[in-house]
Image (spheres, rainbow, N blue to C red):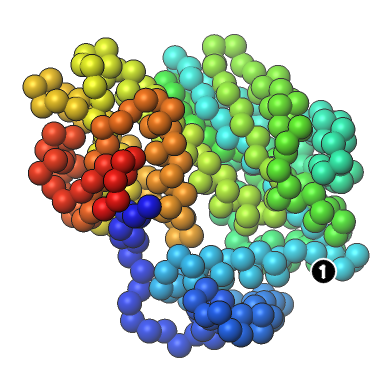
């Protein structure tokens, strides 16, 4: 599968930074990777322990590509894990919420801690989480994303630090705006190092019962809500996975609505996939024939530094197959920042191909 161009604005000037050197080696070299992993983790741990992490900030902002950034973040994630029985293991269980409401409405910010623990206790892979200390409030995505690595590092040092950190986290209402929208909230918890065996494990049989817990506890009159719980994971991994899933589900909802509306006006849907300068992917939905004159409905996916474009593309193409949409054009060249996404008939004049049926 040919990928859409990666237009994320990576720095091009070389930077003298040990962390980047090790991360590049992990990402792009087949030899010496194990040693580079050890050295990178050791350097990150040293910086956080000394509360001097300028080098880490520089490395995160100056990574030259997605694999290097991913290697850096994976090492940081490992450093933030509990390493002994005296340290605290934090985790987050993200829930992606698809909301539909005629007027803006607030959901409860209380976490269903007892129900979560009781549900998770029923399944071997998630049972350790039932013995964790769950925070009483749900954390909004925007608040969760503001927690810096140094804060996670400090709060894992001992139980007192964890309790103080938990008490400092905000309690903020979860606002669902009018119309359809997609959000992420996090249930947070902490416990001992043994929790790590349950982190990142697929929910499997626990998925539907856990979904039911969230549906029942977040239900509000006048709001149609669909809750999709993700696997509990370390804070950084949970943040990355939840960001991706929120966009994926938002694209699913957008595509379904757009395709339904187009099919009410014309027999065939035409879709254009393109990259845009500035690190964006765009998916335009319209009529396959120019005669209908429909303006395309466009979904924009802003790529995070570690987003895998191939995964985004494949998920989208699978969705189009499920929706029985075959008229797709993937543009070979990225669009400029101010260039209009062409309609499907216009895209036939561009350099592109149908990714369902042919290679570029």
Secondary structure beneath label 1: loop
Write the residue at 46% across / 55% down. Answer: 308
Picture coordinates of residue 119, whole percent (x, y): 82, 30
Write the residue at 71% across / 23% down. Answer: 212
- Using residue 196 as the reference point, say whether residue 52 is left or right of it: left
Write the residue at 30% across / 58% down. Answer: 5
Quarter of the view holding residue 257: top left
Quarter of the view holding residue 18: bottom right
The foreground one among 45 and 150 is 45
The foreground one among 288 and 110 is 288
Asked if residue 23 is positioned above or below residue 217 in the image, the reply reads below
Picture coordinates of residue 342, whole percent (x, y): 16, 40
Picture coordinates of residue 71, whole percent (x, y): 56, 70
Around disc 1, counting alpha carbons within 10 Å, would you say few (fewer than 14), some (14 to 19), or many (20 or more)? some
Q: Which residue is mark 1?
A: 83
Q: Is residue 166 shown to the viewer in this render?
A: no
- Using residue 222 as the reference point, say whether residue 296 is left or right of it: left
Asked if residue 279 is positioned above or below residue 312 in the image, the reply reads below
Q: Is residue 357 shown to the viewer in this render?
A: yes
Count of numbered circles in the view: 1
Quarter of the view holding residue 35: bottom right
Considering every residue shown, the one lying at the far front of the view is: 358
- Using residue 70 as the reference point, say whether residue 203 is left or right of it: right
Picture coordinates of residue 24, whole percent (x, y): 50, 78
């Amino acid at each position: 599968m040919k990928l859409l161009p990666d237009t994320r604005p990576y720095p091009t000037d070389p930077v003298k930074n040990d962390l980047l050197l090790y991360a590049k080696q992990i990402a792009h070299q087949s030899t010496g990777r194990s040693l580079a992993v050890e050295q990178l983790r050791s350097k990150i741990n040293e910086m956080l322990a000394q509360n001097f992490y300028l080098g880490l900030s520089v490395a995160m902002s100056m990574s030259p590509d997605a694999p290097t950034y991913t290697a850096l973040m994976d090492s940081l994630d490992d450093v933030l894990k509990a390493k002994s029985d005296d340290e605290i293991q934090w985790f987050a269980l993200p829930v992606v919420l698809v909301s539909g409401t005629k007027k803006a409405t607030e959901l409860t910010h209380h976490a269903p801690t007892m129900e979560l623990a009781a549900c998770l206790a029923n399944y071997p892979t998630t049972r350790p989480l039932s013995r964790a200390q769950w925070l009483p409030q749900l954390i909004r995505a925007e608040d969760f994303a503001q927690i810096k690595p140094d804060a996670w590092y400090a709060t894992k040092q001992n139980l007192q630090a964890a309790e103080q950190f938990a008490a400092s986290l905000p309690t903020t209402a979860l606002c669902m705006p009018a119309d359809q929208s997609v959000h992420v909230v996090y249930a947070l918890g902490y416990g001992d190092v043994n929790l790590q065996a349950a982190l990142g494990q697929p929910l499997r049989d626990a998925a539907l019962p856990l979904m039911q817990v969230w549906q029942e506890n977040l239900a509000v009159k006048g709001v149609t809500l669909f809750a999709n719980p993700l696997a509990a994971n370390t804070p950084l991994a949970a943040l990355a996975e939840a960001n991706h899933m929120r966009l994926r589900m938002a694209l699913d909802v957008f595509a379904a609505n757009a395709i339904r509306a187009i099919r009410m006006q014309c027999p065939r849907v035409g879709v254009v996939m393109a990259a845009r300068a500035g690190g964006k992917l765009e998916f335009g939905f319209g009529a396959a024939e120019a005669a209908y004159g429909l303006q395309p409905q466009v979904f924009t996916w802003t790529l995070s530094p570690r987003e895998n474009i191939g995964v985004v593309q494949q998920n989208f193409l699978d969705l189009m197959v499920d929706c029985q949409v075959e008229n797709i054009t993937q543009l070979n060249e990225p669009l400029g920042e101010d260039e209009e996404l062409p309609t499907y008939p216009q895209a036939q004049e561009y350099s592109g191909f149908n990714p369902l049926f042919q290679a570029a």
